[in-house]
Image (cartoon, rainbow, N blue to C red):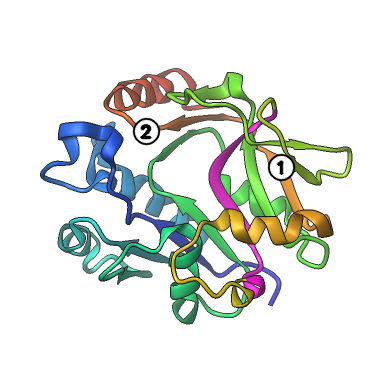
Amino acid sequence: MADPTAAMVFAAGFGTRMGDLTQNRPKPLIEVAGRALLDHALDLTDAAGVKAVVNAHYKADMVAAHVKGRPDTELLVEQPEILDTGGGLKAALPHLGNAPVFTLNSDAIWAGPSPLDCLREAWRPEQMGALLLLVPLERTVGYTRAGNFATDAQDHLTRSSSGMVYTGAQVLHTGGLAKITEASFSLNVLWDQMLPEQRLFGVEYPGYWADVGTPDGIGLAEKMLEQHANV
């Protein structure tokens, strides 16, 4: 099957940059515009018609209670250690099926079309190992670091600090994960397998994207939604 039927939603991080806000709750349950960050992500998977697998580690019981009873959503608790993005995805494979999968970070807010629809439209499974959704720095909100990737005329990716920003949304084939023996690892390890084979691709998101990684990011994301909700 070439089209994704499931999405991995990463919600296991400690949220240390949030300071006191994550003392009593996990970062994915922090609210932006009256809804938990995790709900913003799950609204996207619901609209795309795909199953969501959510991982949790820090204050996992609170995440479990939050998603309990939500249709087409399954929770996986990472214990005793957190597995990072690559390890978390690999551990979730039995629950995600054999098709390519979407992945979403739970600490992002979008103003514009569905990121999953953008990925689905540009996905060419026979050619691509992974397709990353990117946004220019000038259309990011709350993001204070450098860019991650540049694209060529064929949309192949190269790493570039002066390039566009990876938004935490992608669609990918998961077969390469079997070659990685570590339990905990970043998805960068999988991307590094694909780069020399020119199987790592990018597509530009046409709207605005907020990185809700710090307390200031909450208000910035809410302002973005007010100004650009109809992009």
Vertical placement of residue 54 versus 93, above or below: above
The residue at the point 36 percent across, 34 percent down is: 213
The residue at the point 39 percent across, 21 percent down is: 226
Does residue 41 appear in the picture of this structure? yes
CA gap, disc 2 and disc 1:
22 Å
Vertical placement of residue 104 versus 37, above or below: below
Tell whether position 123 is magenta: no
Give the image location of residue 94, x and y in percent. 47, 82
Q: Amino acid at mark 1?
A: Val
Q: Nearer the viewer, residue 214 or 169?
A: 214
Q: How many marks?
A: 2
Instruction: Say whether residue 192 is left or right of residue 79.
Output: right
Give the image location of residue 179, x and y in percent. 64, 75
Q: Amino acid at mark 2?
A: Val
- Disc ID at residue 203: 1
State the image quarter where residue 12 is shown.
bottom left
State the image quarter where residue 222 is shown.
top left
Residue stretch in magenta: 163-176
Vertical placement of residue 225 versus 104, above or below: above
